[in-house]
Image (spheres, rainbow, N blue to C red):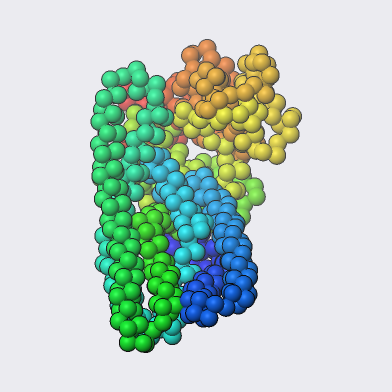
Amino acid sequence: MLKPMAVGNDHWFFGPVLSCKSVYVQVIFGSVLINIFALASSLYIMTIYDRVVPNNAIHSMWWLTAIIVVVIFFDLAMKILRGVFVDTAGARVDKQVSTALFDRISRHDANLSRTATGSLAGTVRNFDILKEVIGSASFTVFADLPFIFLFLVVLYLIGGPVAAVPAVIVPLVILFAFLLQPIIRRMTELSQSQGKSKQAVMVEMISALETVKTTQGISMLRNRWLNSVLHQSKSSTKTKITSQLAAQFAQFGQQVSQIGIVVYGVFLIADGNLTMGQLIACVILSGRTMAPLGQITGLLGKMNSAFAAYKSLDEILGTQSEEEAAAAQVERQVIKGDISFKNVSFTYEDQPEPVLTDISFDIKAGQRMAIVGRIGSGKTTLLRLLCGLNPPDRGAVLIDNADIRQIRPDDVRRNIGVVLQNPVLFSGSIRDNILMGNPSASDEDLIEAARLSGAEAFIGMLPGGFDFPMSERGRELSVGMRQSVAIARALIGKPNILLMDEPTAPLDSSAEQQMVEHLDTATKGITTIFVTHRGAMLQLADTVLALEKGRIAAFGPKDDVLAASNKGA
Ligand SMILES: Nc1ncnc2c1ncn2[C@@H]1O[C@H](COP(=O)(O)OP(=O)(O)OP(=O)(O)O)[C@@H](O)[C@H]1O
């Protein structure tokens, strides 16, 4: 079960934002000053027209000009500082949220592993949109919004009834933007989800480029790509046009307001109720009143994108994973290695049939068990449940009599060595890759793990030995070499439980025999569970579990199970 996280200091987004509270308070303070400065320039022009020009008061003009120049410099300094503060806060939030994102995605969570890699990458990329809004100077426009009312009041104090013109237009612009808002939001969400599908097609193709090149699959993927590009560009164009409509209406409102003030003002001047200077000041103030609305409506598209990005990120970061929930429960520095399955059943999401049904068995610490069965009988799935990659729907997987979901994930990772099917290596040296199994291991541990896995034999022949540099996925090594490095990575943490999924599958029979001999030494005294289709690996096992269509067909000492199966055959 996923539990929503509380909003507060621990919230993935509002937590970091609130931690920059003091910076944002300074930004608001800066905005107050900037808006007050904006009043000064219209008052200056009004005074020049009404007092200085009629009286030819050049001396006063110099004084007033000196004051307004100082104000303009302060205004400039404030705007620069405000921009710097917003950027600084944005960078801090970015660092914290990006770290949380990495941690969350790198933790094995069944819910995330169901999401396509490309789509996940798209969600992560969307964080940039959110970051751009909160970390950009345009964000400060929100701080300017309340000043619309201040400007209206000042407009009234200076121009009296002319204030009625912007006072009518401002709510109309706001209303129009509000009415468009849900439409823009829907379009933005659609455009973002289509963007993620586009990313998913590209990532899937790039990650299997060689397969794509050597099969006839290019045209199929190309069609998928073009379809998603077409859909996304259609919806993003619609979103842009609609949000521009709101911005254009705000600009239109600004122009109408200024013309309205001029026309109304001329009548008021004719009646002697307004001066020329007051009229000019009112026109300037009306522009200033409407400016934030223009900016906000221009930002509507971006803000909706940011909101949609927030929502999709919240699906990843806003919930507490089961392993995090369990983290607080049982600490197991050392796991001895007893394993029990109690009536375990499991169905992959969106699949009609269970993959494992009512699986129960016990093995004692130090036993070595082979899981055998036909293709698709559920062997890998059983191993996935054992590493905690997927939680069972019913029943429980117990390690040292504790439900694996209740053991801290770090303790599970430290005590269980895992070699998955087709293990992945990372760019970096062989040393880096093996140390991923235990970053604090000594050089002796490293050499020992390489010896036990059989990797030592070829590492010595590579240029640089353990420092041999590899690129992405370790493609400079043969499949068998990669397998040995992956086994060394699993062994270096000296685990008491070792899980392996067909560790000898890519090897020929002589390499397999060698690997079996290495593993025989490496797994002495360790609870070892491995999936295999190969007879040679069975030499290691003292216990065999045979699966058939997700149910236990046989379980017991190797010789008994093999004898029974020979009799059956
Ligand atoms: N991620 C998944 N989502 C949905 N169904 C899955 C997933 N992984 C496996 N399955 C299905 O679960 C069943 C068991 O798969 P599993 O990989 O556990 O079998 P296996 O015995 O290890 O097969 P093999 O010998 O081919 O490795 C299969 O029918 C497979 O289609």
Q: Position of residue 410 (x, y in %)?
A: 59, 48
Q: Is residue 96 visible?
A: no
Report which quarter residue 74 is drawn in. Answer: bottom right
Q: Which of the image's four quarters has the C terminus?
A: top left
Vertical position of residue 560 compared to residue 395: above or below: above
**For residue 246, side relative to residue 323 (left or right):** left
**Residue positioned 66% across, 15% down in the render:** 463
* Ligand 1: image quarter: top left
Vertical position of residue 214 compared to residue 500: above or below: above
Q: Position of residue 384 (x, y in %)?
A: 45, 40
Between 394 and 508, which is closer to the camera in this rendering? 508
Q: Residue furthest front?
A: 56
Between 69 and 200, which is closer to the camera in this rendering? 69
**Residue positioned 40% across, 69% down in the render:** 287
Q: Which of the image's four quarters has the N terminus?
A: bottom left
Q: Position of residue 222 (x, y in %)?
A: 28, 29
Q: Is residue 218 visible?
A: yes
Q: Position of residue 115 (x, y in %)?
A: 38, 44
Vertical position of residue 225 compared to residue 145: above or below: above
Between 353 and 229, which is closer to the camera in this rendering? 229
**Residue positioned 48% across, 14% down in the render:** 508
**Residue positioned 74% across, 34% down in the render:** 442
**For residue 45, side relative to residue 223 (left or right):** right
Number of numbered discs present? 0
